[in-house]
Image (cartoon, rainbow, N blue to C red):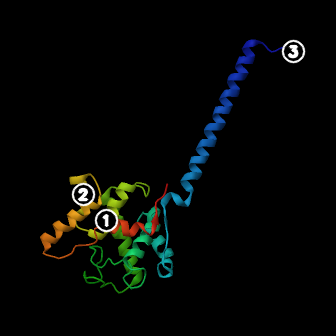
Amino acid sequence: MAVGREERERQVRLQKIGIAAAVGLAVLLLLWAFQMLPFQKGRAVGLSPEVEQHRETVEAYCAEYGISGYSELVLAIMQQESAGQVVDVMQCSESPFNTLYARTPGSIGDTDYSIRVGVETFAYCLEEAGCKSPRNKKRLKLAIQQYNYGNDYAEWAMENYGGYSLENAQEYAGKMMAVLGWSQYGDAEYVTHVLRYYRMGW
């Protein structure tokens, strides 16, 4: 039986719709798979065995504080801060979130507590920097420098320069040295130093 012209056109339209739907579904599946890949959140590299042994603890606290996507970066920060060689592995005793030990350098006497305080501090830094994703490189760098400087660096950098740069990190350090009468303030190249141990996600 011959198929009429209208029927043929209808069949062609349905075929095109089917192909488009299949392509759309394939794209959605690929996007979902891409989001699930581990390199999306970046990965830590060059970690010492002493830092690697704290991976599960870091992941647990990152989950607790709602920053699971940043656990690899926290490990990179730990590598830069201490390489896992001291008890206060996150070097966060001066953080306002440290409520159990004196807020003086290296005063934290419990490694698990150091990781907890470090993660909580970094979660705060991410919030201050307005960083919503580990793939937002500009805001992520601002949060990293905030971890080192504390105080109002992220807010100051956003208000005056729209974000982090090495130059404004150096300027802020000079400003704080003048205010505090210190000969040194933090590490103006902290972002570069931390990112030696971290590969950004896609």
Q: Secondary structure at mark 2?
A: helix
Instruction: Give left or right: position of 3 versus 97.
Output: right
Q: Mark 2 sits on what residue?
A: 157
Residue type indicated by callout 1: Gln
**Residue visible at 49% across and 70% down?**
45
Tell me: residue 68, above or below residue 51: above
Q: Mark 3 sits on what residue?
A: 1
Residue type indicated by callout 3: Met
Tag 1: Cα neighbours inside 10 Å, few (<14), some, or many (≥20)? many
The answer to whether one can see residue 63 in this image is no
**Residue visible at 39% across and 74% down?**
80
Q: Secondary structure at mark 1?
A: helix
Instruction: Give left or right: position of 96 versus 53.
Output: left
Point out residue 55 in the picture as x, y percentages from the top left corner.
50, 74
Query: Most extreme residue toward the right, as rendered?
Result: 1
Tell me: residue 173, above or below residue 137: below
**Residue visible at 36% across and 55% down?**
138
Front-most of residues 84 and 31: 84
Q: Mark 1 sits on what residue?
A: 145
Q: Secondary structure at mark 3?
A: loop
Which is nearer the N-term, disc 3 or disc 1?
3
- Are the residues tagged 2 and 1 within 8 Å (C-beta)? yes
Residue type indicated by callout 2: Ala
Which is nearer the N-term, disc 2 or disc 1?
1
Q: Which quadrant, please, contains the N terminus?
A: top right
**Residue visible at 32% across and 60% down?**
142
Point out residue 196 in the picture as x, y percentages from the top left corner.
43, 68
